[in-house]
Amino acid sequence: MLSTILTSLVTSLIVSLLTFTVGLRTGKNQADRPKLKEIYRRLVVHFEDLKTAIDSGSPKTWDHFDKSLREKSPNSESWVYLPVVRAMKQDGTILDLPIVLAQNLEVLERDLMNFGTDYRQQSLNAGATVIELIQQQALQPGASSARGTLFGKGTSCTEIF
């Protein structure tokens, strides 16, 4: 009789602990859901903005974002730009995401920021090259104007470009 009571008590205790554990996990998941939803919303908006900027022909660069003082010494200061993922890493929010996802987001954001910087630099270089070519062409003997012989006799600007 005593063994039956003891067995029943142990079984009840185990079932109660399992139910309690499952309830805690469910409650924690419910509590974390709005926080995660906000993090994912913020990331989607950020990467959609980056995509829209690329589609419009003016990708965002590091200096489109806030910057934070990384290190200050008596002789110099070190600043770091904080796009969304980098800011989330700095404030610890990124720890709520799966590790692989967080790492991929960091790499993607860095690559997109570097692309924007490279694109801007290439655009500036291309503009300078075009101006240099036009100046060289204008300085050639016999070059008078766009109407005259600048592009060759009988050749218009629209035929060249």
Image: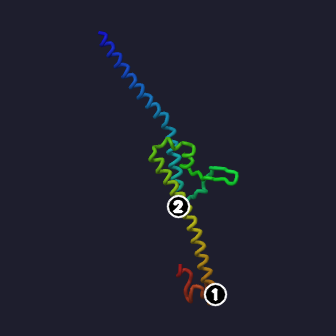
For the residue pair 138 and 110, the one nearer the viewer reads as 110
Please provide percent x and percent y for residue 133: 59, 79
Q: Nearer the viewer, mark 1 or mark 2?
A: 2
**Which amino acid, mark 2?**
Phe
Q: Position of residue 33 (x, y in %)?
A: 48, 37
- Residue at screen point 54% across, 57% down: 113
Q: Which of the image's four quarters has the N terminus?
A: top left
Position of residue 124 relative to residue 11, above or below, is below
Left/right of residue 12 with respect to residue 27 in the rendered view: left
Figure check: 145 above or below 82: below
Q: Amino acid at mark 1?
A: Ser
Q: Are marks 1 and 2 in contact (CB under 8 Å)?
A: no
Q: Give the colour scheme of this rendering.
A: rainbow
- Residue beneath disc 2: 115
Q: Position of residue 61 (x, y in %)?
A: 57, 58
Rounded to the nearest whole Å, what is the CA distance between mark 1 and mark 2? Answer: 40 Å
Q: Which residue is mark 1?
A: 144
Badge 1 or badge 2: first in the primary sequence: 2
Q: Which structural element holds mark 2?
A: helix
